[in-house]
Image (cartoon, rainbow, N blue to C red):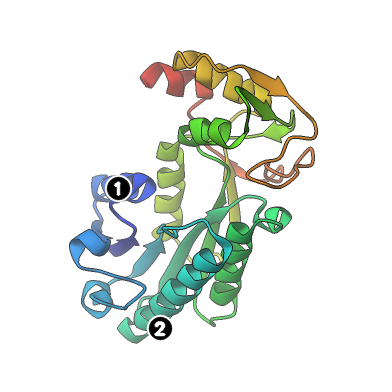
Amino acid sequence: MKVVVIGGSGLIGAKLVTTLRRDGHEAVPAAPSTGVNTVTGEGLADVLEGAAAVVDVSNSPSFAADAALEFFQTSTGNLLEYSAKAGVGHFVALSVVGVGRLSELGYFRAKVAQEKLIRESGRAYSIVQATQFFEFITSIADAGMVGDTVHLAPVLIQPMASDDVAAALGRVAVGEPLSGTQEIGGPEQFRLDDLVRTGLRAQHDPREVVADQQAGYFGTRLEERTLVPEPDAQRGELTFAQWLTRR
């Protein structure tokens, strides 16, 4: 089965290509470095020819609201158009758990707009919403800096390994379209401040992490369950402790 992975050279995309190939599928990475540009449409017709599914794990190069919205609307619109012309039967996109609850942030409003385009396209589709990756812990700490300390709200988070994200996307891509959304998360829940504190300590990062109920999260306030999936979400296998050991 031919599966085209848009963003196939990135963190999730490269792992997804490896996963699909290991399972015997023809996985084709597509990115500007391979001559495919979803914003301009360059290379899309050729790479999508003969594909049974396309998986979009690409991301906006900018987190600014207007730039992110323009990227996702243009890129997703082109992908929907070109994949329809190529007869691709399954359109899969990676999104974020809680994206609607984080819509105060322009980037997440752009992701909501992307999901809306897909749902209203009339195409057979699956949207996979993932929780934050273990690999993002340092970025979360950086965004929470207040002076010399990291301030984070002690809310729940259920992060997961990028390997498990890729595995879940692979299963969805080669299966029947969901015509809806599947949430995925890690096997454990943590308090956000505890998770980041543990992660920084494991990396020998000396920054102090302070539990602060009023702290923002990339500029927005969090409720207790903003970042966690529903109870029926699929769960990854790799625990945080196991991931740290592998690192």
Residue 49 appears at what percent x and percent y? Answer: 24, 77
Residue position for label 1: 14
Image height of 84 relative to 57, above or below: below
Which of 225/151 is in front?
151
Mark sitting earlier along the chain (1/2): 1
Q: Residue 162: x and y, percent? A: 43, 39
In the image, what residue occupies the spot 44% across and 60% down? 60
Query: Secondary structure under badge 1?
Result: helix
Q: Which residue is mark 2?
A: 81
Query: Which residue is found at the position 45% from the left and 78% from the top?
Result: 77
Q: Quadrant of residue 209?
A: top right
- Identity, as a three-letter code, of the amino acid under mark 1: Ala
Three-letter residue code for mark 2: Glu
Q: CA distance from mark 1 to mark 2?
A: 24 Å
Query: Is residue 73 or residue 81 the one in the foreground?
Result: 73
Which residue occupies 44% across, 24% down? 243
